[in-house]
């Protein structure tokens, strides 16, 4: 096993202009800041390539090349094959379009399983298919543990189960679900899976082929990139799905068929800046490498996970030791079990009071339902203003976590 070097967080932070300000940012699960490399790619495209791409003249050819390169890099980042990743405006929109594209596959009475753990993006669009005769079954979270139990899913699966939609990692509870095991179970029952990886992707490497998932979603704006969404689908599924673009866009024209109007040109081109940033970090920590991109990202994400676990340990210790605090989800910082996204309730306090108090200390956290409204209701937290959430990524520091703990200790 490769011996990991110490993570140079100061070097990483130097790439992010937003981190030059005195704020300690802990609402990263809602969206990360972007490095200079992404900003440079966006500005350069707007300055030099803001023309209609795909024409037979220089600037137009260059624009198409930059968009195509970004598309290819996102496929490699996810571990996908060429043409299996759609760059769309958001994960919510990508799921909505996917649901419409798959609707002709289903007959009245067929079953789709959704959860009450997830962000609504991978839930609401599927639930809406009940309007056309499908049966929606809910895989319910244990309200005490904020966990999805595989045994509960087994009880839901029938010969009519066509699709199971769930998250790789909760954007509130932070627990990492066993995607390969769940996928095997669903496939054995004759169904497909659609996995929301938005809360997982900033923290762990993506590998859609190794997991054998049918569909997988993530959002670059939570992986240090521009505000877009990525949808992966196995090629055979994407070919079979009904096109959602203009009538003259054929069912074989992937990924364009699931992206009405086509991708945002400048933001798509800026996705390359994410990989520029990752490569700068990789060279700094591992030196020159002949590894393919996916291999380099594997090493880099292992480094992120180690750093994030060390960051999270004192925060978990504080939340679990402090009287009157209810930590949602797993009471651990172990990287194998959870991402460093922590939500909690404070006895005697509304959740929406606490971020404002911490802002006076120069600390940014969030509160509410974070579009996982069904989980908030299952937790009984609706009348408390939802939960308080603090989420870390690799550019956070131990000093910032110390400030966060001290401010919370004073506030609660």
Image (cartoon, grey):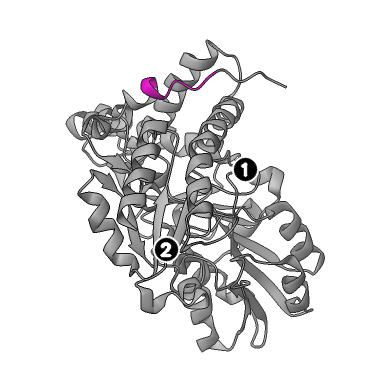
Q: Residue at x 29, y 66 (%)?
A: 352
> Does 216 sit above or below residue 11?
below
* Front one among 265 and 319: 319
Q: Position of residue 243 (x, y in %)?
A: 49, 64
Segment tinted magenta in the rendering: 6-11
Residue 22 located within the stretch drawn in magenta: no
Label placed on residue 307? none
Examine the image and state in which quarter residue 303 appears: top right
Provide the secondary structure element on which disc 1 rests: loop
Provide the secondary structure element on which disc 2 rests: helix
- Quarter of the picture holding the N terminus: top right
- Whether residue 407 sits left or right of residue 134 in the image: it is left
Q: Is residue 152 visible?
A: yes
Q: Is residue 245 visible?
A: no
Q: Position of residue 245 (x, y in %)?
A: 41, 63
Mark 2: give few (<14), some (14-19) or many (20+) Cα within 10 Å. Answer: many
Q: Which residue is mark 1?
A: 334
Q: Residue at x 34, y 58 (%)?
A: 412
> Does 107 sit above or below residue 54?
below
Q: Residue at x 60, y 85 (%)?
A: 134
Q: Position of residue 217 (x, y in %)?
A: 52, 54
Examine the image and state in which quarter residue 330 appears: bottom right
Q: Which residue is mark 2?
A: 92
Q: Position of residue 59 (x, y in %)?
A: 25, 29
Mark 1: give few (<14), some (14-19) or many (20+) Cα within 10 Å. Answer: some
Nearer the observer, disc 2 or disc 1?
1
Q: What's the CA distance linking mark 2 and mark 1? A: 29 Å
- Whether residue 250 sits left or right of residue 152 in the image: it is left
* Front one among 340 and 169: 340
Q: Residue at x 30, y 34 (%)?
A: 63
* Front one among 98 and 112: 112
Which comes before the other along the chain, label 2 or label 1? Answer: 2
């Amino acid at each position: 096993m490769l011996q990991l070097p110490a993570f140079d967080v100061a070097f990483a932070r130097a790439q992010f202009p937003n981190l030059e300000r005195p704020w300690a940012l802990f609402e990263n699960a809602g969206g990360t800041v972007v490095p200079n490399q992404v900003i440079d790619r966006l500005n350069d495209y707007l300055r030099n390539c803001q023309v209609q791409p795909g024409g037979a003249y220089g600037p137009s050819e260059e624009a198409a090349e930059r968009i195509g390169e970004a598309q290819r890099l996102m496929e490699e980042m996810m571990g996908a094959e060429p043409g299996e990743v759609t760059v769309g405006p958001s994960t919510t929109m990508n799921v909505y379009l996917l649901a419409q594209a798959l609707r002709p596959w289903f007959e009245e009475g067929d079953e789709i399983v959704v959860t009450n753990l997830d962000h609504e993006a991978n839930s609401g669009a599927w639930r809406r298919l009940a309007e056309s005769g499908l049966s929606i079954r809910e895989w319910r979270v244990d309200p005490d543990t904020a966990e999805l139990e595989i045994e509960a899913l087994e009880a839901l699966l029938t010969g009519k189960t066509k699709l199971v939609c769930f998250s790789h990692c909760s954007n509130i509870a932070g627990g990492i679900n066993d995607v390969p095991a769940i996928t095997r179970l669903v496939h054995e029952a004759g169904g497909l899976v659609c996995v929301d990886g938005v809360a997982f992707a900033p923290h762990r490497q993506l590998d859609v082929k190794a997991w054998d998932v049918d569909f997988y979603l993530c959002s670059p704006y939570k992986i240090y990139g521009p505000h877009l969404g990525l949808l992966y689908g196995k090629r055979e599924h994407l070919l079979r799905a009904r096109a959602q673009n203009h009538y003259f866009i054929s069912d074989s024209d992937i990924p364009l068929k699931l992206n009405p109007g086509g991708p945002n040109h400048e933001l798509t081109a800026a996705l390359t800046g994410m990989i520029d940033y990752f490569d700068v970090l990789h060279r700094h920590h591992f030196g020159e490498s002949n590894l393919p991109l996916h291999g380099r990202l594997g090493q880099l994400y292992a480094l992120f996970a180690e750093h994030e676990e060390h960051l999270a340990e004192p925060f978990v210790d504080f939340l679990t030791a402090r009287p009157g605090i209810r930590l949602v989800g797993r009471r651990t910082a172990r990287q194998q079990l959870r991402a460093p996204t922590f939500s909690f309730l404070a006895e005697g306090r509304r959740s929406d009071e606490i971020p404002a108090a911490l802002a006076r200390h120069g600390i940014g956290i969030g509160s509410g339902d974070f579009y996982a409204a069904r989980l908030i209701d299952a937790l009984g937290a609706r009348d408390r203003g939802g939960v308080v959430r603090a989420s870390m990524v690799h550019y956070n520091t131990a000093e910032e976590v110390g400030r966060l703990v001290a401010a919370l200790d004073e506030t609660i």
